[in-house]
Each structure stands twice: as structure tokens, then as C-alpha cells.
Amino acid sequence: MNPGMKLLLVMLIALEISFTQSLIVNCILIAVSFVYILTQHIRMKALLGIIFWPLFPAVGLFVSQWLYGSAGIHFAWILFTRIYAYVFLGATFTLTSSITDLSLTLEQDFHLPSKFAYGVLAAFNLMPKIVEEVQIIKTSALMRGEALHFWSPKLYFKSILSAIQWSQNLAEAMTSHGFVEDYERTHYKIIRITALDWTLFFVLLIIVQVLLFFIRY
Amino acid sequence: MDNKNQATTGKKQSQWTLRNIILIALIAIFTGIIFWGAGFLYTALTVALTPFGMAPFANDLLMGLWCMAGPLTGFIIRTFGSAFLGEFLGASVEVFLGGQWGAGAFISGLVQGIASELGFTLTAYKRYDWFGLNASIFTTVVVTFAWDMIRNGYDKFSLPLLLGLFVTRYISTFIFAGVLTKMIVKLLDRSKAINL
Amino acid sequence: MTDVSINHFTFHYPESDVKVLNDINITFKSHHFSLLSGPSGSGKSTLLYFIAGLYPHFSGNDAVGEIKFGDTNIKDIPREKVSQSVAMMFQNPNQQFAMDTVVHEMTFVLENLRIAPDKMDDIITHALEFCGIKRLRSRVINTLSGGEKQRVALACIVAMDPQVIVLDEPFASIDPDSREDLINKLKILQEKHGKTIILADHDLTSYRNLVDEFYYLDPDTHHINLLDDEQAEHFFKNFESTQTINKKVEVPSGDDNSILKINDFKLEPHHSLLLKLNHLDFYKQKTTLITGANGIGKSTLFNALTKLLPYEGTIVFDGKDIKKIRPLPYAKNVTLLFQDAENQFLNITVKEELDLSLANRTNTDYTQADVDDMLNKLDMAGRDDRIVYSLSEGQKKKLQIIEMLIMNPPVLLMDEPFKGLDYHSLEVVVGFLNRAKKDFHQTQIIISHQLSGLDTLIDYHATFKNQNLAYQEVIK
């Protein structure tokens, strides 16, 4: 499915189940997402990760609602499954789509100005370097005798200095590579939203509506 | 370095240049990665508070941290939408790092983005000072709290608990998105790395 | 014919009176290979960025004078057509790509130039072939070495096919094989494809007999002069002399006390082996010089020694595995003087920076008088309120060295500490380092390409070569 449409669908459904209260629909969404993820050849570690980590907030919400909520244990279960529904819905997108393709479709089909599509993409592609840079900033501060933590203004200050320098370098490099803001470009890989994409999008969305309408438990 | 950084030329031009877009995205990613390091804290707090049914306090205690990227980018690139984009991208980073929120983080990012942008909108993008920052803090707390009433079932809690959570969130947001942001912006301003 | 002519070109940064470029009048000839040299930070890059059409757009303020490609002022070329005239290769290999993989980046480049999609595959294949990197086509750029990244950058330029190619110290961090290969490719582009090449570099290795013109940017007058053969030869000779040292050193005899022990060690970032060591010691209160070609892993070794990078094997400091020493105490014992001085700064003004070192140092061996003396000798006194980020590269380096000396760690690792320093300052710094060693028992490990002037300092010399690091008697 077109990654842009997929993201939109995932977000619409996630938004919707934030307002609705159906335990069964949450479970159906989790199950369907889970099966879909299984068909996509996902690494075991990634799969276990998305099952394990949400356990903490999910149990936390469950217990507090169970003890202090006015809506009883049923509602507590709704919150519990809601967390997992978010995660599994999200995973159908993040574990199966590339941000490169997302940028391409946002530019070509959703008419996002190319400077946003490629500017943000270029920044995201530097992510491993950014992880290293944060480490360098912290280590270099240790050598000056200061430990920087997430509450230290200087950690952010130094990070932003790097960000300023890097954004300048990247923008210059992209310009030198022929990129001109707000100017037409050709496209090697044409990503279209096909009739199938539209059909899938609406069919899935309607199914969720129907489920939510009929299943109130 | 020879290529000294200069902020965008002239105030009349659109601030949405390629460079500024990349800058907002980079700041969002940097902050996202720094919070990522604090993720264990959230999990630890949650584990500690869960037996008492007080786990939501972990969320509210750290809320300010998660809402920092918005005011920061809003202050550095002073134009409509920059706070929103920074906050939204910051939340998205967590998704791609494999966070525990999944699609929830996208939506939180959307809500938090709108929330912190709203503060700058209320001051008509003219008050880049303590007042403007507080406006953004106020809208952030109110909007995100309203959102959690729905999403995390806060509306089912009793009034005292609700108030406790609200005050916690306000303090957290005030400290991280307010005081900390102010200190960072002051350092940036003094360093003249960018024309603020 | 598109000569690149620079006419009455003067530039200074806002809020600064110093003219970085002062009334420049030169012509880079069409189809020639021109070398522009001068000390780092003298303004070479600035001129190149203007020629590449990136300034004034990215600089914030404009220059006086004009740059012409043939008869056309660069400012009259529409933005979307600039890339047909000129493309640039940058110093930092890491921040010049927008996309994730090599082929995506090259496609991005061609899309920007509005090339018809059905022609792209051939252009990309041809460009990759020309640069000898067909095997990198689908690789993720982040996993490439510096040398490979610069080859990809050249492949992008070949695909773009501009008239003029501008390169800003493109080989600063890449291995010698890549460097040689890239220079040969540039020569072919010039001779067979009629490209005009303008390359800025302060490192003059392997340009002799290759470049058609040698320009020099004088750091005092900020003029650029075309050198005749004799003058050029003088610069080449002079540069070579800075890369040599006339000193025979001992190989450690085993009587010394070792302070850092490396055992069964393997350094393999991104799955490419950089260094394999069965055993190597660094010795207490000695200065060890590490030499070796660019990009072969010297800095990476320092990153392992400072726990910035994972490694296989053990590193023992003062009898303890460094993995078992907590980060802060370790960092205060084994400290790195970063190659980029700005990395080391945490504050805003010179005084705040010095005060931080005075507050956090582990011992008080340096008195306030010592500090003032060091500042005076390096001409850094009276700059208390200057913003550190606005200092010149040389001043940043001096401040960084002073503040790390004040910290006075038992082991000081230094990555190219003399880069950007004039010769006099270098001699002064060598004096400081000798004192730190003799009076305060400091152990020093230095990576440096600059060798002249270090005679009195170096005790041991280790060469980094063929994934090995070994002590040598001769320094070359």
C-alpha cells in the first residue's frame, strides 16, 4: 500500500480509537495488525520489543484506572489494549515502510513542497551521526569535568550549535547537488496512489467504522 | 570554519528556507535522541509507581521533557508552524527509534505540536520573551491535558487526583519547556551562533 | 571557453572589520587545474563558496566585486541553471548527501537537474564506473568510509557534468589511496573532458607536476597571487620540510612504566578492519608520536581509548580495565584534545572557558601566574570577553590547548594539536607540553602530520600502517 495512505489510515484509526471505547475492536485491531506484521518478515527482536516495552505504560495505566478510575475494570482493559493497538497499528507502518518512499509520495502525491520532503529526509538520514555527536558532546564535557544530563542546558546548547552547522552544510551541499527550492524536478520513481490504494483505504476505514458502530463492549 | 553561520537574511523573506527546515528537523532529532536516553527513567518511574496505581504521574512528570522541542524550534525559527514541525518531528523520532508508543507518538506529536504552536499564535508571533514562552507553556499544558483526559482516561479520575496530575504536568512543563528552554536560548543568544 | 574570472573581489563577514578577501583579481583558466593554497582559515573556502554560487545566498552578506563565468556574471545565471556551470565537493564527507543510499543520492541529483528519468540509469552507471565504485551503487551512505564518501561525491559531480568543478580541501580526512585515485580522476576530467578544476588545499602532498597554476592566499594581506614555478617550488619544498623531522628516537626498551596497555585488540567500525594489535603499551611520562596516512584509523584509535567507540579486546589504564572505570573519573584521567577545538568548548566567553578549567581541574599544579603567562605567550591575553565561537581557528586552538593543559590530566591524547597554529605558536606550545611532562609527569600521545619543530618533545614514535601500530626508530 502507498506509504502515505498507510500512514494516514493508521493515524485516522489511532485517533478514532482514542475517542471510542470498545475493548473488542481494540483487540481485533491488535490481532489484525499482528498478523499483518507477521507476514512482513520482521526480525524477532523487533517483534519482541514491541510486545515487551509497551507493557510498562499499559500496565501502569491499567492499575491506576482499576484502583482510582470511576469506570471500572472494563475501562481499564480498554486503556490497556488501546496502548497496544497504537503500537501495533504504528508498527504496520514503521516496520514495513521506508521514510524515503514516504518522502517521495508526500512530494509527488500529497503536494508537500520538495524542500520539506527532502530537507526533513536529509536530516533523518543523519540520525546515526547525531547519536554519535551526542556521545561526543557528553564525552568532551566529561573531559572538562562536567557531566551533562538531559536536564543540562549546555547539552542542548552544544547540540543546537552542531545542528546549526550541519543544517548549513547540508543545505549548501543539496544546493550544490542541483536542488533549487520551489522549482520543478523530474521523478525517477513515480509513486502514485492507485485505485487499489484508495479501495483498500476506504474499505478498511469503513470496516473499522462498522465494527465500532456495532461492537460497543 | 569559513562558512560562518548566518541566520536567514532579512525579516521580510519567508523563514521557510531549506536550511531552516533542515535545522528544525535536526534540532528535533537531537532533542529526541537526548530524551531517548531518559527513556529508562520513564520506565523506571512507571514500574515504581504502578503498584500504587500512580503510573500516570510518570507521564506527567516527564511531559515537559517531551514538549521541549516545540518551544525551542519556535524560539529559534520565529515563524508560523516552526514549533509545530519541531515538536511533531521530535515525537516521530521516538517512533523510528522504536519507542513504546507506536502510532500513539505520532498522534501525541500532532497534539503537542498544535499545543505549543498555539501559544506563539496567541502572541501573534511577536512575543519572543518570557511572556511568549509562558503562553506556549500554558497552551501546551491545557491542550495536552485535555487530550489525556480522553486518551488515557484521566476523565475517570477523581478531582483531587486530576488536580494533582495537572499541577505535576504544569510544573514539569514549566521547568523543561520553560526554564530550561529559556536557559538554552540565552546561551544561543550570547554565543551569537544565530541571530535571534 | 569559460574562464572563471574574479574582479576586484572583496569580502568581510558582518560584525568584523577584517577583509577575508581583499581586492582579489585573478582568472582561473578554462580547462586548467588550479590549486589555491594558504593556511587553514585564511578565506580559501569563502572564495570557493562564492564561485560555486552558494554565497551570498548562504552567507548572509554579499561581497563587493564580481565573479564571471566567461562573459556572464554568476549572479545573472538563473538559480536552476547554476548547476550546469559549477558543482562543489566539500571538506566534510558526512554532511553532503540528502539521501540514504548512493543510487538514491545520484537519482536525487539528476532529478534536480530535470533529467529525463529514462536516461538516469545510464548516467549513474557511467559515473559510478568512471569513479571505480560500481560496487557501492546500493550501499547505505552512512556505512561508507570517508574515502568512499568522497568518491560518491565525485560520482555525483560527474553525473551532473558541470563546466567547473570546485573542491574545498576534499581530501582532509581520507586515506592516501582514495586521495591519489581521486586526484587522478580529476586530472582525467580536466584533460579528457575539458573541465575546469579549482581546488583549495593547505596540504600540498602530491600536487607537484599536476597542477597548471598555483595560487596562494596570503594570510596577512588577504591577497591572492599567482605563483611562478620557482615560487611554487619554494612552497612545495617548504611544505615537505614541515612533514619531516631529523631525529632518531629509541624504541621502548621495556624499562619504562606503561600506563596504557592494549591487549588482543581489534578495531572494526562498520565491519572494515582498521587495527589489529596483540599487544601494545603506552609509557608513563613519555611523549609518543603516532604518524600514518589520513583516514587509516588514528583518530578512531583515540575514540576507542576514550570509550567513544566499541572495540574488541582490553585496554588497561593504570592496572584497571577501562570498561570498569566510571566515565567521569576516566575522562579526567585520559583526556582527549579534540581535533576540532569547538568540540571542547562548553561556555561562551574566553574567561568562562578558562574559569571552567580552573574550577574542574584535578590538581592545582598550574598557578594563576602560569595561566596568565601561557595566555601572554600565545597572544591570548586581554581577550576575556571574546565569544569563543567568534575567535579565529588559530585562537580557538590556542585557547583549547591552554584550557586542557590547566585540567592537567595524567594522560593527554592530542589529535592534530598543531593544526592551524603558526610556527612560533607551535614552538611555544611544545615548550608548554615539555613542562607538563617534566614537572607534572604527564603522559602524552600525539597524532600529527606536522612534524617539524617537535624534535625536543618526542620520546617515542609509533607508525600506523597495514592495520598495525608499531614503534619505530626513525620518524618519517
Image (tube, coloured by chain):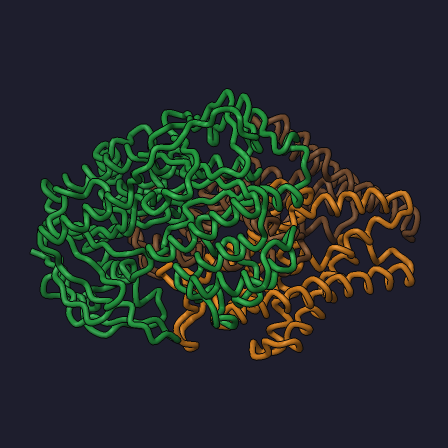
Chain colours: A brown, B orange, C green
Q: Position of residue A5 (x, y in %)?
A: 52, 46
- The answer to whether residue A5 of the structure is visible from this angle is no
Quick one: quadrant of the C terminus of chain A? top right
Q: Is residue B117 above or below residue C334?
A: below
Q: Nearer the viewer, residue A20 or B30?
A: B30
Residue under the image location 47 percent in, 49 percent down:
C433
Q: Is residue C153 above or below residue B162?
A: above
Q: Is residue C419 left or right of residue C387?
A: left
Q: Position of residue C414 (x, y in %)?
A: 47, 45
Q: Position of residue B195 (x, y in %)?
A: 47, 72
Quadrant position of residue B85: bottom right
Task: Name, please, the residue furthest toward the left.
Answer: C1
Q: Nearer the viewer, residue C395 or B94?
A: C395
Quadrant position of residue C11: bottom left
Residue under the image location 30 percent in, 54 percent down:
A176
- The answer to whether residue B44 of the structure is visible from this angle is yes
Q: Is residue C142 above or below residue B132?
A: above
Residue under the image location 62 percent in, 38 percent down:
A91
Residue under the image location 49 percent in, 68 percent down:
C387
Q: Is residue A100 above or below residue C358?
A: above
Q: Nearer the viewer, residue B139 or B78?
A: B78
Q: Is residue C75 left or right of residue A187?
A: left
Q: Position of residue B142 (x, y in %)?
A: 74, 66
